[in-house]
Each structure stands twice: as C-alpha cells, then as structure tokens.
Image (spheres, helix red, strand yellow):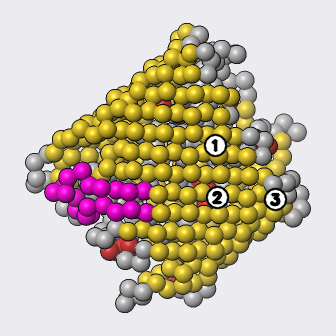
C-alpha cells in the first residue's frame, strides 16, 4: 500500500482556487478511483503473498534459478483532513522467506508520508517523502506504485532494475505555491532522491547515486480550464563508483500547457531546452544542449482511473554512471467492474542512450520493458483476494548485474483490512 500522488491539487481558497499543473508538481498522478477515496480514517491490514519467480537467482554458470517465496506485510495507514491540513501516513514492513534459497530471505521496509498545509488563504506548502528498503524491486505490498506516472521532468526515474539485490531508495519533495491573483500563481520547490546498494557484489556494473534539484514556475489560467506557464528546473546527480566522483548537472527552461477539463481529468504538454554539464575525472567536462518533451494525462472517475506519460529528457543515476538521453513511457489503469471485483494494469518502456560515450562507465545505454496485471476480489467486508502477473525485460549489454534479462513472476495475495473513522 502506498500514498497516492497529489499532483494538480487546488490551492485552498474558494471557487477561484487554481490547480498546480502536473508539469510543475513534484507528485505523481493518483491511480485510485474516486469511489476508493477516503478521508479522516486510520486503517490497518495484514497481507500474505506467495509468488513464483523464474529468475529468483542466477547460477554460477549464469542461468536463472526459479523459486517460490512467502511474504507477510502488516501495515498501518492514517489519513487526516482539517480546514488547513491534509496528512497521509503509511508504514508497511515486510518479511519474505524463500522455499529453496534461504540466503535470499529478507526483511523489507516501506514508508510514505505526504502533507499539504495551507499557510494562508493563498499560500500552500506540500511535503512528501517515500522510503523503500528491499531485496527485490517487485516484492512490495503495492506493485502499482513501483513506477509512478508523473508529468514533471524532475520526477524520480527508475533506470536499471536489479530484481534481486539489497537496495535502499529514498525520494522526497517540497513545494510552496502562492496564488497572488485570481488567475495567476507562482511557486517553487526542491526534490531529492537517493539509491544505495549495501552489497555491491550483488550488482556488478551498477553504482550508488543521489540527486537533488530545484525549480521555480509561473502559471496563468485562461477560461478556468486552460493553464499556460513556464518553469526553470535544475538537477545535480552524483554517482559513486570505485574511483573519482561522477557529476551530471542539468538546467532547463520549459513552457507548458494544461487543459483541466474537470478536477479529475487533465492533459498536459511541456517542452523546452535543457543544458547538461557532465564531469568525470580525469576527462575534461562536456557540455551540451538537448530538447525536452513531456506529455501526460490523468483521469479519475467513480470506478475508473487512468494515467499515462511520455518523457524525453537528459537524466542520470538509477544505477548508471554518466548522462543519458532518456525516452520513457509509463501507464496505469484501474477499473472497478463491480463492488467486489477490480482489475488493474501498469506498464512502462524506457530507452537510454549515452550523451557522450567517453563519459559512460556503464556502457552506451539500453532499454527496459515492464508490465503487471492484477485482479482483485473482495471475499468479505474485510477479506480480499488478489492475483497478478509481472513481466520484466531489460537489455543493458555492459552491465553484469543484468546477465539474465527476463523475469516472470506470478503471485497470489490474501489480505485482511480494517478501518476506523477518526473522531468516532
């Protein structure tokens, strides 16, 4: 379970409140349906998952080894809304045992918190942080949140997926917006993300990294449904291989347009130019200009949710060293067929090409394809059954950690959930 993204929230202050468009929001699109929205509650759950993976480990000869795992996920969630504050908190530790390869047994941690606070009728502060400690990227209580669908170039990018490796991921953002007139808003904020592999021998060819960034924007609303604006974005990405520090810095000026048809349906387009500065000792620095293109949309109805995006940006980190032209597309759909039956699917495709081959310690790039499908059935008021399938394909020829590029995982989950309204 995870906290839904808060992109495109209205700044409190009455009927004239403006939205924060997706291209300048630090959060992703919400992927729950409107009928699943809840406020002012505390909720607990206990999930039991069994899964079969045909690539649970790799033999000394380099062939994939299959195994069956058993996981338990207790969790606690809190959602509180007042006249000035909206806070969402979620914590879920995990315990996983493998049937044959006990050396893969693991304890995971998942923590999410989001806060929106109205400092004044026209000034709003948003804070969010997400922490994940795992030995398997796809072994988590809410698989749909693994790759968020966002509309901003500063959203965290999952570059190379190490299916079975100890890793610690942390991502956060802070944003302050000020609606200084009926149809005009300014804002700014910062983001950070960190990726750490505690056992580097599990991920030969991949490296730790962290990224920090800042942004500022201006947005103007026309006819209550049309938003135009511009934004400046800066990112500093550092990778830590054995040897000298590797640094990627990007600065971009983008224009954007958002069509906000309803509070729950929007389409955004943004584009501009991005300047990249790559440093990798002992080579001299390299500087280049590149175009940036982003298209995204989000739609939420009572029983349906849909989100999708496409981005072409220069980025780095995510296990790689150097700067890469990243072309990525992600999508998520969820449909409630009845009060007891829900289906969902997520998918993504990414291509990475090095900006300058002389500055890449992890090769010229590669591509990845991911996809998941789930079906959920509510057996009783508090008891739910879920079954799903996940497919992962990666092609990064120079990275030894991806020697077995394909993973297929089937899983079944039984969960018990309860909730209680706050104040009762």
Please report contact status of discs 2 and 1: CB closer than 8 Å, yes or no.
no
Q: Which residues are magenta?
A: 350-368
In this picture, residue 191 sits left or right of residue 363: right
Decide whether residue 165 is among the magenta residues: no
User: Residue 386, position in %: x, y?
Assistant: 74, 66
Q: Distance from label 2 to label 1 (Cα)?
A: 14 Å
- The label number, if any, that marks residue 345 in the structure image: 2
For the residue pair 215 and 391, the one nearer the viewer reads as 391
Quarter-of-image position of residue 214: top left
For the residue pair 319 and 94, the one nearer the viewer reads as 319
Looking at the figure, which quarter contains the C terminus?
top right
Decide whether residue 367 is among the magenta residues: yes
Report the residue at 31% width, 71% height from top: 397
For the residue pair 424 and 288, the one nearer the viewer reads as 288
User: Residue 95, position in %: x, y?
Assistant: 62, 70
Q: Which residue is mark 1?
A: 30
Q: Nearer the viewer, mark 2 or mark 1?
A: 2
Secondary-structure class at tag 1: loop
Q: Is residue 179 visible?
A: no
Report the residue at 62% width, 17% height from top: 224
In this picture, residue 166 sits left or right of residue 285: right
Q: Earlier in the sequence, mark 3 or mark 1?
A: 1
- The label number, if any, that marks residue 341 in the structure image: 3
User: Residue 148, position in %: x, y?
Assistant: 54, 49
């Amino acid at each position: 379970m995870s906290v839904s993204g808060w992109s495109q929230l209205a700044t409190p202050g009455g009927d004239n409140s403006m939205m924060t468009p997706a291209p300048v929001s630090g959060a992703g699109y919400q992927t729950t349906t409107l009928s699943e929205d809840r406020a002012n509650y505390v909720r607990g759950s206990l999930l039991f998952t069994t899964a079969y993976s045909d690539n649970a480990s790799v033999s000394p000869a380099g062939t994939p080894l299959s195994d069956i795992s058993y996981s338990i996920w207790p969790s606690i969630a809190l959602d509180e809304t007042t006249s000035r504050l909206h806070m969402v908190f979620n914590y879920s530790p995990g315990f996983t045992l493998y049937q044959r390869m006990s050396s893969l047994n693991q304890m995971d941690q998942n923590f999410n918190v989001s806060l929106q606070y109205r400092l004044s009728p026209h000034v709003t502060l948003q804070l969010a942080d997400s922490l994940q400690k795992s030995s398997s990227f796809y072994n988590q209580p809410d698989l749909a949140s693994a790759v968020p669908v966002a509309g901003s170039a500063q959203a965290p990018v999952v570059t190379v997926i190490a299916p079975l490796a100890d890793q610690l991921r942390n991502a956060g953002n802070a944003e302050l917006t000020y609606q200084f007139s009926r149809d005009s808003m300014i804002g700014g904020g910062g983001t950070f993300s960190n990726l750490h592999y505690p056992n580097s021998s599990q991920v030969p060819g991949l490296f730790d990294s962290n990224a920090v960034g800042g942004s500022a924007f201006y947005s103007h609303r026309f006819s209550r449904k049309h938003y135009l604006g511009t934004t400046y974005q800066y990112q500093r990405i550092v990778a830590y291989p054995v040897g000298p520090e590797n640094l990627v810095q990007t600065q971009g000026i983008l224009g954007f347009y958002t069509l906000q048809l309803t509070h729950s349906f929007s389409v955004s387009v943004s584009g501009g130019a991005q300047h990249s500065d790559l440093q990798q000792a002992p080579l001299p620095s390299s500087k280049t200009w590149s175009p940036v293109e982003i298209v995204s949309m989000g739609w939420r109805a009572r029983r349906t949710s849909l989100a999708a995006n496409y981005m072409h940006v220069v980025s780095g980190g995510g296990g790689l060293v150097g700067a890469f032209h990243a072309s990525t597309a992600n999508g998520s759909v969820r449909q409630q067929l009845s009060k007891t039956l829900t289906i969902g699917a997520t998918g993504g495709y990414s291509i990475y090409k090095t900006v300058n081959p002389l500055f890449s310690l992890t090769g010229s790039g590669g591509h990845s394809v991911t996809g998941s499908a789930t079906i959920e059935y509510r057996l009783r008021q508090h008891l739910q059954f879920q079954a799903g399938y996940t497919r992962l394909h990666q092609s990064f020829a120079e990275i030894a950690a991806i020697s077995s590029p394909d993973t297929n995982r089937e899983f079944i989950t039984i969960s018990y959930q309860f909730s209680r309204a706050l104040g009762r």
